[in-house]
Amino acid sequence: MITQSRKQHKSNPLSWSVKRTMHLSAIASLAVSSSMIHAEVSQQQPINDNGIEINRGDNRSEPSTTLPTIVVMAETNKQVTENTDSYTIPVTSSATGMGLSAKETPQAVSVVTNQQIKDQNSTTLIDVLKRTPAIQVSGVDGARNGLSSRGFAINSFQIDGLNTDFVQQAAMGEYSANTAMFDHVETVRGATGLMSGSGDPSANVNLIRKRADSSVPKTELSANVDRYGQYGLSVDRSQSLVESGAVRGRVVASYQDGDTFIDRQELGQSLLYATVDADVGDSTTVSVGASRQHNKSKSTMWGGLPNYLSDGSKADWDTSKNGSADWTNWDSDNTYYFADIDHDFNADWNLTTNASYNESDSSSPKLLYMYANGDQVVNPDTGLIFNLNPFHADTERNQFNVKSKLTGNFDALGKTHKLIVGGSYSKSDLDTFTYKSPPDGMLPLPDFSDWDGSYPEPEWGARNRSSDVTTKEKAIFAATQLKLSDPLAVILGARVSDFERSGVQYGRNVNTEAKHIWTPYAGITYAVNDNHSLYTSYSDIFKPQTQRDINGKFLDPIEGKNYEIGLKSESDNGTLQSQVSIFRIEQDNLAQLDGGQIIPGTDLEKAYYGAKGATSQGVEVQVSGQISDQLQASVGYTHFNAEDNKGKTINTGFADTTLNLFATYNLDHIIPNLTIGGGVDWSNGYYGIVKNPVTKQSEKYGQDDVTLANIMARYSFNDNLEAQVNVNNLFNQKYLAGSTFSGLTYGEPLNVVGRLTYRF
């Protein structure tokens, strides 16, 4: 039995500790932002209404006799971060579909810009999310990861605003998406049903692709290598395809390969991304493109390392230990085709249609899983382990997505307001074929302490279809931002969705549908002054379920509700932004066993009922951007308390308190062309409840607080050539990176990565 002290379940939205944390964080954020804004304004030279900088010999109002400096500003895309050297972005649209500034968006949004991706040398999506505030990442095994935010799993992903299913259980490589083809990553936390539809009330991750937005020929070449033998090359080429510059092209190619910190494991990637943007007249732009990424994964572990020894003690392996066999692999391929049409009717109204088709497959992985059954675990004296499970399967997923939206401004009651209306449709087909395992089982494993992967590959049996599932979702949505006064704005929106899932998965019928699901959105922002705004919002989401009640009826979808209040601040020029968010999330209709009852007429299918579900409440603080001319930083802190409907802590495999800090400092005034930086990623302890196979008792198996430090340095030899070095896990901390602890997965030890970049 598990003995735990149960917390008293209260209706009070926030505990005293969270309130105190929120109060202190809000004061700190406001003080930091206000002081920086004051410093920035005091240092700037005034500019008159004509955009002319007036030089003053002193701080008096009289202009000097020197000639004025005329500042010419080029029009840029406010939703592109490439070549801005910034840690902030003026406008995002992931939360509401409308292009709004951070202060106008009544929900917590984090953006990892192109410059931050480069500074931290984040080469995959997982690298980006590990350092995104309020996102928790765990390692399931050698090819899979778990993601969580605010106490709930993250299953909502978009690419350029289009919903995209990432089938993580099949590990088809989506989490390893190469950042070389993306401009930045936006994360909206909480329930995001207005834009994403079905999902969990955790977060929505939106990957924004690079575009062919340059008519000037330019090329970037880079090469990298790390201490374990990973190496790579990449090229990024943009240019005009016609003399006028109306048609532009871009190609990104990348190749990575080599060893990792895990013995015998080899990981690699090859990426080819191409896109063309064409201006069709003065008001219409058409974009088409495609990408293909192959992910290589050789001798990759499935399920992690054994967690117990036969004496009942917890195992402690070297971080380099590999439990896979030499013949195992977990390769995957991702191919995307996309097309966008963007048309401006006039200065106020725009119609955009996005469509994509993608094919993903897990390329015939062959895996070997080691596990405990009863007292058959690793013997510390003989090193023997008896339980082996081979697996061989083919998984394929085809997905089509399309979305069209009309956005614009309209005048009413002396104010200008914003409006978005649109619709979306998605269809996903998932097929899995498994090969029958050897009927006579597997040979006993030799001494695991000296295991070197030498183990014969089994003779696989017949190939049979095990999953055939089709998922469809269609929706219409609308939202408006109403300016009730100069400081006060209200955002009201709703989405109506139809969801349908049909087919069979591992012998179980998964047919279910949800019609006309209404997901509302409401938010209020109040501008305290030009630099600070208060906000509150309510957002909603739903998630269909496959469980049925005692009458055989599928349960209603889970409904996730997100209540949020906060303070957002930014400097006069928007290069420094901060936000403090206080939230409460509720889940309703969460499936619960109905007293062990069996649905009549079924083959022992257990009945469920929809109960009032889990809650999560907490606070998030984030400050990002340019603190001074030399210093740029991103700081994020989060703390939450998540419980089920009985007041028991949930999702314990992820830390409930985290701090992410990263900063760079330009030393050009001391050592020309040198930039240094570094950061800390800290999280409190996390654990799982597992059964000790020897004592037969359930117990905690977890990880204490983890502090990972990293440093970087970049030196520009000239305008074209630069070198960068990143050191991760500087103090070589050994830690468990898993979330369930039924199998052990270790985080990467100290690593040094060097990169050389040449631009012309």
Image (cartoon, grey):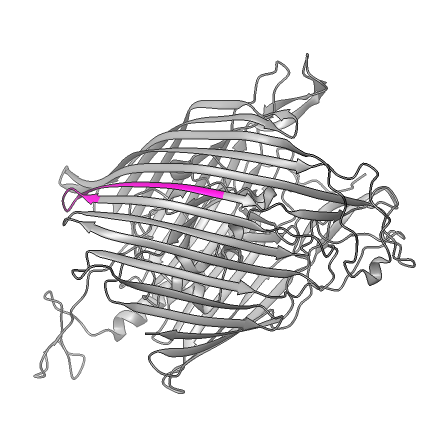
Q: Is residue 288 above or below residue 474?
A: below
Where residue 355 appears, as percent x and y from the top left, is 35, 40
Considering the image in quadrants, where does the C terminus appear? bottom left
Q: Nearer the viewer, residue 497 or 101?
A: 497
Q: In the image, which residues are magenta?
A: 343-359
Q: Is residue 402 visible?
A: yes
Q: Quadrant of the N terminus?
A: top right
What is the magenta segment's predominant secondary structure? strand
> What residue lies at 64% left-to-right and 23% top-to-bottom?
608
Query: Is 344 covered by the magenta stretch?
Result: yes
Q: In the displayed orientation, state which residue is furthest to the right.
A: 381
- Per the image, is 725 magenta? no
Residue 515 in which image quadrant: top left
388 sits to left or right of 141:
right
Q: Residue at x 70, y 43 (%)?
A: 391
In the picture provided, is 29 more to the left or to the right than 173?
A: left
Q: Is residue 593 left or right of residue 84?
A: right
* Residue drawn at 56 percent across, 38 percent down: 615
**Picture residue at 9% right of the left edge, 83% below the top:** 66
